[in-house]
């Protein structure tokens, strides 16, 4: 698995695919003003290699996944500039990238327990402040959880965190 691939080429992706590798994508380029400012989401997803979305920055401080979703679906940076033309993903692809697709990257974890809401799987779920598929691109960045359930227990509800 590799990550942080803003300038990965199709040739490198083909070699990675032959080795059975995958790419975990982050959106740290969101703040850059250069173009193209990868990662080349569309090229990677279309290549057929395992692709997941996340951020290792969350090991330092909480990161808003909806800003990543905005960037991956629009290619527009924080300055309002289109910096990743032709590499956008659909909202469905982004949702799958943050959920089901990431099972592949958890090597050793039972993939039958994670990634989708089905009977017999772990039921971690969030209820969002608005409809992810219906909000405008700008409002996508403003989504937040109004209810979070982990391992069958409410850990966040109505602005109250229940981590104790």
Image (cartoon, grey):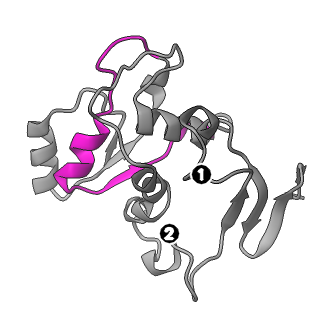
Tell which residue pokes out farthest to the bottom in this image.
Answer: 120
Q: Residue 10: x and y, percent?
A: 12, 38
Query: What residue is disc 2 on?
Result: 115
* Gap in angstroms between the C-alphas marked 1 and 2: 18 Å
Q: Are marks 1 and 2 in contact (CB under 8 Å)?
A: no
The earlier-in-sequence mark between 1 and 2 is 2
Can you give x and y, in whole percent of width and height, for residue 136 in the image? 57, 39
Q: Quadrant of residue 104?
A: bottom left
Q: Please tell me which residue is depicted at 59% across the width and 51% down the height of the picture.
A: 132
The residue labelled by disc 1 is: 132
Q: Residue, x 60% and y 40% (percent of image)? A: 140
Q: Is residue 48 magenta?
A: yes
The magenta stretch spans which residues?
32-58
Please, is residue 79 above or below residue 151 in the view?
above
Q: Quadrant of residue 42?
A: top left
Of marks 1 and 2, the one in the foreground: 1
Which residue occupies the foreground of this view, 84 or 50? 84
Q: Give percent across and percent down for residue 119.
A: 58, 88
How far across and down, in percent of the image, does residue 61 sit?
68, 35
Q: How many marks?
A: 2
Q: Label 1: how many residues lie within 10 Å, few (<14), some (14-19) or many (20+)?
A: some
């Amino acid at each position: 698995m590799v990550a942080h691939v803003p300038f990965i080429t199709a040739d490198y992706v083909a070699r990675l695919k032959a080795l059975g590798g995958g790419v975990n994508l982050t959106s740290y380029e969101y703040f850059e003003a250069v173009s193209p400012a990868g990662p080349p989401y569309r090229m990677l997803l279309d290549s057929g290699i395992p692709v997941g979305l996340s951020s290792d920055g969350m090991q330092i401080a909480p990161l808003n996944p909806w800003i990543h979703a905005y960037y991956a679906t629009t290619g527009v940076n924080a300055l309002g500039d289109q910096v990743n033309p032709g590499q956008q993903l659909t909202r469905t692809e982004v949702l799958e990238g943050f959920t089901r697709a990431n099972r592949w990257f958890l090597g050793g974890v039972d993939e039958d327990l994670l990634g989708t809401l089905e009977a017999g799987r772990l039921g971690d779920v969030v209820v969002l402040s608005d409809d992810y598929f219906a909000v405008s691109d700008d409002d996508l960045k403003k989504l937040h959880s109004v209810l979070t359930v982990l391992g069958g227990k409410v850990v966040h509800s109505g602005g109250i965190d229940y981590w104790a």
